[in-house]
Image (cartoon, helix red, strand yellow):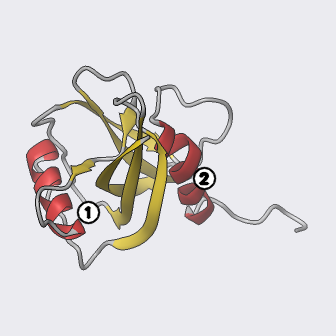
């Protein structure tokens, strides 16, 4: 299988009972995914995220405020026969954050990280469901030990 290398950002904000994650849906796609995208020639992770977030959502990426979560891979959501290999960063959303759909982004949404009952209300990319949501939920402040544990 061919590989697609991307940089992505898990942008989180406080939400009722925990945190919410910004997800985007590209035009012509049914699945939501993290904002970010493919590298241009010679770009670093920070340069790629800065460019993609500016073009797609009108947001600024601050590499000093971001934490590298690692490299994750899964079946590509929009390109059959490909595997996406994503270097993912996590950053807290600042107050008044207002993403605006630009470039190829059709829709944005906030996904509650503490909602672990059943399937999400929106279709998600395999990278999110298989790799990133378990990682992010485990680190979310809404996750606390059960009583008596």
Q: Secondary structure at mark 1?
A: loop
Residue 33, located in which quarter of the rendered image? top left
Residue 134: image tag: 2
Residue 71: image tag: none
Instruction: Residue at 61%, 29% (x, y): give it.
Output: 119
The relative height of residue 121 versus residue 54 in the rendered view (above or below) is above
User: Where is residue 134 shown, x and y percent of the image?
Assistant: 60, 53
Instruction: Residue at 90%, 67% (x, y): give it.
Output: 148
Residue 118, located in which quarter of the rendered image? top right
Report the quarter where the C terminus lies: bottom right
How many numbered discs sit on the rendered protein? 2
Q: Which residue is mark 1?
A: 94
Work out how far the residue at label 2 is from the one at label 1, CA to CA, in angstroms. 23 Å
User: Where is residue 45 shown, x and y percent of the image?
Assistant: 24, 67
Q: Secondary structure at mark 2?
A: helix
Report the quarter where the N terminus lies: top left
Q: Residues within 10 Å of mark 1 (few under 14, many from 20)?
A: few
Instruction: Residue at 47%, 26% (x, y): give it.
Output: 123
Instruction: Residue at 45%, 35% (x, y): give it.
Output: 125
User: Where is residue 116 shown, x and y percent of the image?
Assistant: 65, 42
């Amino acid at each position: 299988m061919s590989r697609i290398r991307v940089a992505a950002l898990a942008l989180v904000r406080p939400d009722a009972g925990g945190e919410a994650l910004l997800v985007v849906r590209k035009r012509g796609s049914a699945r939501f995914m993290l904002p970010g995208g493919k590298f241009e020639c010679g770009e670093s992770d920070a340069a790629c995220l800065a460019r993609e977030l500016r073009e797609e959502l009108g947001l600024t990426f601050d590499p000093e405020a971001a934490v590298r979560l690692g490299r994750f891979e899964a079946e590509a959501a929009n390109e059959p026969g490909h595997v996406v290999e994503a270097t993912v960063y996590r950053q807290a959303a600042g107050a008044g954050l207002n993403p605006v759909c630009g470039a190829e982004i059709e829709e944005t949404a906030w996904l509650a990280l503490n909602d672990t009952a059943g399937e999400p209300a929106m279709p998600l990319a395999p990278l999110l469901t298989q790799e990133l949501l378990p990682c992010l939920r485990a680190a979310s402040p809404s996750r606390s030990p059960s009583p008596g544990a």
